[in-house]
Amino acid sequence: MTAIDFRTAPEHYRHWQLSIEGSIATLGLDVDADGGLAPGYELKLNSYDLGVDIELNDVIQRLRFEHPEVHAVIITSAKERVFCAGANIGMLRTASHAHKVNFCKFTNETRLALEDASAHSGQRYLCAINGPCAGGGYELALAADHLILLDDGASAVSLPEIPLLAVLPGTGGLTRLVDKRSVRRDRADFFCTVEEGVRGKRALDWRLVDAVVPRSKWQEGVAARAAEMAATSDRPADAAGIALSPLERTINSERIEYSHVGCVLDRDLRAAHITVRAPANAPPSDLAAIHSAGAAFWPLAVARELEDLIFHLRFNENQIGTWVMRTAGDSALVAATAAALAAHADDWLVREITLYLKRTLKRLDLSARSIFAFIEPGSCFTGTLLELALAADRSYMLDGAFEGDNRAPATIAMTSANNGLYPMANGLSRLQSRFLGDAEALTGAEKEIGRQLDAQEAEALGLVTFAPDDIDWEDETRIALEERAAFSPDALTGMEASLRFAGPETMESKIFSRLTAWQNWIFQRPNAVGETGTLNLYGSGKRPEFDKERV
Amino acid sequence: MTAIDFRTAPEHYRHWQLSIEGSIATLGLDVDADGGLAPGYELKLNSYDLGVDIELNDVIQRLRFEHPEVHAVIITSAKERVFCAGANIGMLRTASHAHKVNFCKFTNETRLALEDASAHSGQRYLCAINGPCAGGGYELALAADHLILLDDGASAVSLPEIPLLAVLPGTGGLTRLVDKRSVRRDRADFFCTVEEGVRGKRALDWRLVDAVVPRSKWQEGVAARAAEMAATSDRPADAAGIALSPLERTINSERIEYSHVGCVLDRDLRAAHITVRAPANAPPSDLAAIHSAGAAFWPLAVARELEDLIFHLRFNENQIGTWVMRTAGDSALVAATAAALAAHADDWLVREITLYLKRTLKRLDLSARSIFAFIEPGSCFTGTLLELALAADRSYMLDGAFEGDNRAPATIAMTSANNGLYPMANGLSRLQSRFLGDAEALTGAEKEIGRQLDAQEAEALGLVTFAPDDIDWEDETRIALEERAAFSPDALTGMEASLRFAGPETMESKIFSRLTAWQNWIFQRPNAVGETGTLNLYGSGKRPEFDKERV
């Protein structure tokens, strides 16, 4: 299978129409039925596959960076008579288990990014449901702040996965019903078993939508609500956006290289050695220079490159089970860049860059890969880059120098960025998650914010897992990687998902634990994916035969 | 397979030794290797199967009810040189997927019951780890308040599931490490990959145990700590316990009958029709009479009978996918009994009865079955029994009477019991969970506490899902049951687990969502259960062959 490329831009979109008028953008879903990412299925009725969602993810990002003037976004269908039929069933039938699971993760992250834009970027989302809106289509709608349903006797919202397909609405729908929209659980139960869904007054009474509008008042109703939502935004009205220029990379079977991020694959150890490089120069001197640097500004470039690498490794390299994070370069320049961001934290673009870094780091937490950090001389695990080590399942920091290496021993440093700028899905910083229930250790670490810490100090503070010296380093790190490669990938995924998210759960973390884990299970069960399971028989006219045993 | 019987008593135990001295009980694990519940495996090295845990669950209950004088419990091994090797691997290999999942659920509930005894009944648990303590053995230890590890060079704690078996520690171990004991996540990661585990000082430093004691000071060290823990108890020193007399039931292929609980199986609809009957008489007139009634006292008898029925249906009737809850009898007597409990809420026995009801209702929430409540004339859904309807995925309440039926239309009534006496795993009452995020509806319902509500009132308040009249009742309820029987059991399980627990998550709910759902997935994956998976090859000398793909 050819590698999936996540890089796109509006001029390449096949499935979405973007139009902008004043402070309102409209995103029209108009799926090209022949534009599936893989052969073997047709994207009828505005149903979608990963390709459709790659474009959606791209446009959500671009609206944030390229269009500061957009204060509200309308998602609607550009097709007559259908809003969206959800994830394409032919795609689900032909996709591997790994692809299905990664597809759901990606679409979940996209919907959360949309909610993040509304909550933190002042770009509010309205969903104008102008036709039947089923399954993943309704789950997309649920991510919006406000849902308007056309009252034409045909437009309805539904989650028909259970009666129709024997799988779950796996893109946050169940969680958003009860946790975000406070739909009563017994009504949610009924709703999820009714193939044709709910429309009109009942949809409104049950909180499934926020408004029901007849066709005669549709255009003006949607426009008026969008204008109201736009009016609540704190985004600038007249700023110029920055262009998210095409992401350059070179790629071959052993190596992926971006401007600031590199990755070498060790297929024997099934490990990806990822290095994030510090900026080569001092940051732009003022805010105007930051804007003028645009997509070339180091923190934004790192966020984009690391994100693209995460996508690539998740989807195209799923035999690579361990990601080893390294950094390289001058930590003073990393710190200076962080200071520049902090100095202009209330600028809209700087805010966007910080939020993009936050989302990218969250994608690390959610990646079903073992993550190690190796902290060696020449590294720059400072502030934002220290988050890479704090996101790791384990970190190894060399105590001292390698024999024959003149470089100074590695140090790490916390900055204020580590103390709340990049919350995880559980709502806590990675430092808070690390020291959960151990207030003394957290306070002890926080006292050292700003100081360069050597390996023994870092270990004593609990910031790294192990601090072997030169004599032990080679053996300890090699054995750790070999061991990881020998374990069952499934067991590691389950373990990491359980240990990474101590403490509170949020709607976001619940989507990825409770809902996703159950969906993954169902995606393995014969009733869904067996020879006589629903996905195989869908559309064949044959009825699936279920094992009636309750587990 | 013969039905599994969950009823036992100390005189029948094969695997546990109970001894009581003053305020301290000692529970010695001494598994009879030939005493497995099913043929085909040997319970070596104090490894366990469901039969061992049925006894543990029984003894935890009995210590609460029969021994008010016991204020601390020591769990230890009665064998030389081993504490517990965890769940038996031969059992896991031969058990069906459904049995494995139900086994994990039961053992999880047992450990939570142990924590409940400590938190709410003043019966504190200490685990004296006198030998290697692996996997499920350590997970049992983690449920105790205090873990003492013998420092003899051989005793160690470990979670070797991932390196050894490619499954998860599925009995709360991962969650308790990071959420209960605040073990740092990177140390937990390392610990879970080291087959031989951790002992001595590192076990203490990493918070894996609370104390490490050499053999020379073992007896006195354990005894002293137990005495300290007992001293913190609020249980009476000199009260007499009540005997949990043998639970009587009659059972055949269509019907299970207890004194207050009955169940009729409709195998065509794959439904169990469960009826809980009100007490026939007024409650005992005073506290002494309650104690004297003992296990015959209606609320305690109902808790025991309903719990036994839940176990039976979960394990022995897993083709029965829907449980329909009904009640029958005089709601005034139900209310009078509740009032008697409320009047003596600070009595140790009354407290135990309430806690038992709480745990039994939680088992309902956690049962992988669709739960409906049918509220008809002659029913008594009041207070504690109303929880059965609030626990249901849906409820149907007849509006009016059936034709030709002279009985008064059904009413339901909330009492103070519905407002916090029986929290769910998420820490909220079922009313709070029902009206999560809808404070107005919650307040509206709370105002009506104490009043008998007819079907239209109950529907308007949001306390029941549907209130069809006589004309629609038969069709609506029949279609609901037929529909449920037609859906995929797996999809229903995933949906119900997602919709039932809106709102906050607790350590308890996280165990059943994040951890259990992942374990269920892994229990379906070829790396664990396939022909060349770990469980099949364990002990054969052959190495499992893993699909190296990360999902």
Image (tube, coloured by chain):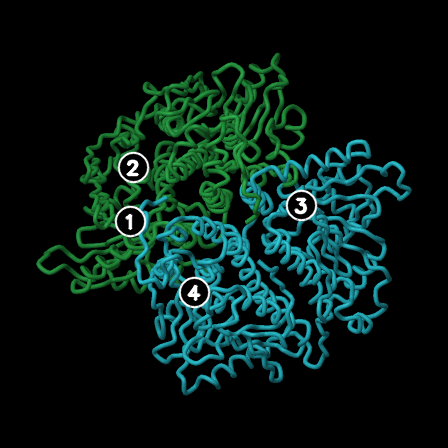
Chain colours: A cyan, B green
* Mark-to-mark CA distance, 2 and 3: 47 Å
Would you call the spot at circle 4 few (<14 residues within 10 Å), some (14-19), or many (20 or more)?
many
Residue A62 percent location from the top left of the image: 65, 72
- Which residue is disc 3 drawn over? A267
Amino acid at dot 4: Gly
Q: What amino acid type should be assigned to the residue bearing mark 3?
A: Arg
* Residue at which label 2 appears: B316
**Residue beneath disc 4:** A135
Position of the C terminus of chain A by quadrant? top left
Q: What crowding class fits label 2: few (fewer than 14 Cα within 10 Å), some (14-19), or many (20 or more)?
A: some
Q: Is residue B273 left or right of residue B370?
A: left
* Residue contact between numbered discs 2 and 3, judged by CB atoms under 8 Å: no
Q: Quadrant of residue B121?
A: top left
Q: Are marks 3 and 4 in contact (CB under 8 Å)?
A: no
Say which quarter of the image contains residue A83: bottom left
- Mark 4 and mark 1: span between their CA atoms? 25 Å
Q: Residues within 10 Å of mark 1 (few under 14, many from 20)?
A: many
Mark 2 and mark 1: Cα distance apart in space: 14 Å
Residue drawn at x 41%, y 46% as measured from the top left: B423
Are the residues flagged by discs 4 and 1 from a single subunit?
A: no
Amino acid at dot 2: Asn
**Is there one chain holding both mark 1 and mark 3?**
no
The chain to which mark 2 is attached is: B
Q: Secondary structure at mark 1?
A: strand
User: Which residue is identified by label 1?
Assistant: B322
Q: Are marks 1 and 3 in contact (CB under 8 Å)?
A: no
Element marked by disc 3: loop
